[in-house]
Amino acid sequence: MSSNVIPLTNATFAEHVLQSSGPVLVDFWAEWCAPCKQLLPIVDDIAEEYAGEARICKINADENKETMQQFQVRGLPTMILFVDGKEKARLVGLVSKTRIAQVIDEALEA
């Protein structure tokens, strides 16, 4: 995992996401999820490319069920983009780097 990717837990989610200004992309994943593993290098690349512009975070859905339920995450991988603590976009399943970048760019331009 890239050093620019912030690992989250139920306890740290509010501080790093809900109380944060600007765009924060949260990747909900699990060890057993093959598409999640395919997404890992893409998320790392996005974290490097958007360092200083957007926060990129990961949260293990199996270990943090409370947060998963709070945001009604039903399938993995799911990525939710928060801006100023509010959900602005949701990507479910294996998505392209281009699509992820598009969602972040739209938030940065807003």
Image: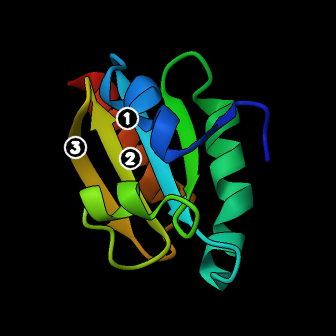
The kind of residue tagged 2 is: Gln
Whether residues under marks 1 and 2 lie with C-beta atoms below 8 angstroms apart, the answer is: yes
State the SS at label 1. helix
Indicate the position of residue 43 as horizontal and vertical percent values: 63, 51
**Cα separation between marks 3 and 1:** 15 Å
- For image coordinates 31% across by 29% down, the residue present is 18
Looking at the image, tell me whether mark 3 or mark 1 is earlier in sequence order. Answer: 3
Mark 2 lies on residue: 102
Which residue is disc 3 drawn over? 87
User: 67 or 6: nearer the eye?
Assistant: 67
Amino acid of disc 3: Glu
| Classed neighbour count for the residue bearing mark 2: other residues with Cα under 10 Å, few (<14), some (14–19), many (≥20) | few
Instruction: Quadrant for residue 33, please give it.
Output: bottom right
| Residue type for callout 1 | Asp
Alpha carbons under labels 1 and 2: distance apart: 5 Å
Quadrant including the C terminus: top left
SS for dot 2: helix
